[in-house]
Amino acid sequence: MPELPEVEALGAYLRERAVGRRVERLEIAAISALKTYEPAPTTATGRPVIGAGRYGKFLDVRFDGGLHLVVHLARAGWLHYREAFPSTAPLKPGKGPIAVRVRLDDSSGFDLTEAGTQKKLAAYLVTDPAQVPGVARLGPDALAADLPLFSERLRSRRGQVKGVITDQEIISGVGNAYSDEILHMARLSPFAITDRLTDGQLATLHTATRQVLGDAVARSVGQRAAELKGEKRSGLRVHGRAGLPCPVCGDTVREVSFADSSLQYCPGCQTGGKPLADRRLSRLVR
């Protein structure tokens, strides 16, 4: 799933490539992906792209006249920039992975695509990003929250720190992959309970959050959209590396699997050398 660094980089890429170009046509190929009905997609026609940014993990493409295309890429969504499209014919709804296509007046543009069968990519055409329910519920941005706010937000929800730090209403922008990396750097078990964290542990976690995400943004911004997934994988130390040696202590990276996700951690760095039980309802090491 694209997280804060990748969405930040996609916004930067669109600012570099698309800003100043006028929309020739905004096409919706996956009807279920468009979550709004007014304004209509034709409203974007002829408007220049004036900016691109993000809210947490939501990408916001801004058009002249106060119109926004806000997109959540979900688990399998991505943005593909095209220097030229193979055809000028309108997209046929329901055909292929393309959910949304934005054609620009220099024959370039971008596709928002989603792989797999679980179609959860969501696009909203709005006059105010706060009209998007997910944006309206977002907590403070993970890179913007200072230590007092960060600590207050994490302590506001009692739970396992892995789940709390990825709750977008608590802190926005952190997902499954970077939370594994943050907790590894902070040397915290993913199942540590938030209201038991000391002030020192919260300070370390805050520093790790800013460092992991900040470093990932620095690596990602400036990359082409097609290169971002590889860049993300190359920078990960524990996520997706189960069975491999930890680059910090050499212990074997382990995994805990759930129904539809998994997490990776290093016992040597995070749990005093003890492996966590690999089932959801077990009594877990903290």
Image (cartoon, helix red, strand yellow):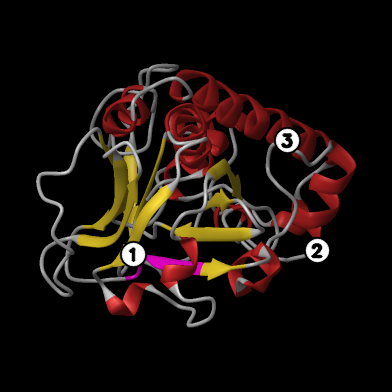
Mark 1, other Cα within 10 Å: few <14 / some 14–19 / many ≥20: few
**Mark 3 and mark 2: span between their CA atoms?**
15 Å
The crowding category of the residue bearing disc 2, from other C-alpha atoms within 10 Å (few below 14, some 14 to 19, many at least 20), is few
**Amino acid type, mark 1:** Phe
Q: Which residue is mark 2?
A: 156
Name the amino acid, label 3: His
Q: Is residue 38 above or below residue 278?
A: below
- Which quadrant of the structure image shows residue 207? top right
Q: Nearer the viewer, mark 1 or mark 3?
A: 3
Q: Earlier in the sequence, mark 3 or mark 2?
A: 2
Q: Mark 1 and mark 3: span between their CA atoms? A: 26 Å
* Residue at (44% x, 25% y) in the render: 220
Residues drawn in magenta = 120-124
x and y percentages locating residue 114 in the rendered image: 25, 59
Q: Find residue 89 and report its image quarter.
A: bottom left
Q: Earlier in the sequence, mark 1 or mark 2?
A: 2
Q: Position of residue 6 (x, y in %)?
A: 45, 37
Measured from the top left, where is residue 224 in percent x and y?
A: 34, 26
Which residue is at a point 38% across and 17% down the rendered structure image? 247
